[in-house]
Amino acid sequence: MEKKHFSGHNQNISRIFELRRNMDHVFFKRFEGEFPLPAGMNFTHMKALLLAGLYQPINMTILSRYMQLEKGSFTPVASKLIRLGYMEKIRDEHDKRAFNLELTGKMD
């Protein structure tokens, strides 16, 4: 009986992740349709800027998790936003191995 309860728990967790994925898709796709993307940027870049704006300063690893991207897949996204001047990479005060991202204000 306990095993059955555990299985139901896993289904609920799966539903929560599916709901989050669907909500992200609806919100960000609607945003993309209503506002033109700046030159050289795509949907993924805009999603990173929006999430970083909500949680800044934000650790690069945490932002990649929020975006549901592997760290290696997120690095080029962050690098391009830094190169375009939309974000800056700042060393974490508490963990000298880690970096945080902050918006520069270029989008204002």
Image (cartoon, rainbow, N blue to C red):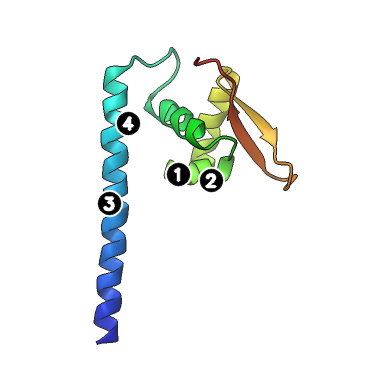
What SS does tag 2 mark?
Answer: helix
Q: Are marks 2 and 1 in contact (CB under 8 Å)?
A: yes
Mark closer to the chain start, 4 or 1: 4
Q: Which residue is mark 1?
A: 66
- Three-letter amino acid code at the position of disc 1: Tyr
Q: In whole angstroms, how far apart are the C-alphas of marks 3 and 4?
A: 15 Å
- Residue 4 visible from this viewpoint: yes
- Three-letter amino acid code at the position of disc 3: Glu
Residue 62 image point, x, y percent:
53, 45
Residue nearest the observer in this picture, 70 or 103: 103
Residue nearest the observer in this picture, 73 or 97: 97
Mark closer to the chain start, 2 or 4: 4
Q: Which residue is mark 3?
A: 18
What SS does tag 3 mark?
Answer: helix
Q: Are marks 2 and 4 in contact (CB under 8 Å)?
A: no
Q: Which residue is mark 2?
A: 62
- Three-letter amino acid code at the position of disc 4: Phe
Q: Who's the residue at 32% across and 31% down the image? A: 28
Q: Who's the residue at 58% across and 40% down the image? A: 60
Mark closer to the chain start, 3 or 4: 3
Residue 53: which disc?
none
What SS does tag 4 mark?
Answer: helix
Q: Are marks 1 and 3 in contact (CB under 8 Å)?
A: no
Q: Who's the residue at 46% across and 32% down the image? A: 48
Residue 28: which disc?
4
- Residue 69 visible from this viewpoint: no
Q: In whole angstroms, how far apart are the C-alphas of marks 2 and 1?
A: 6 Å
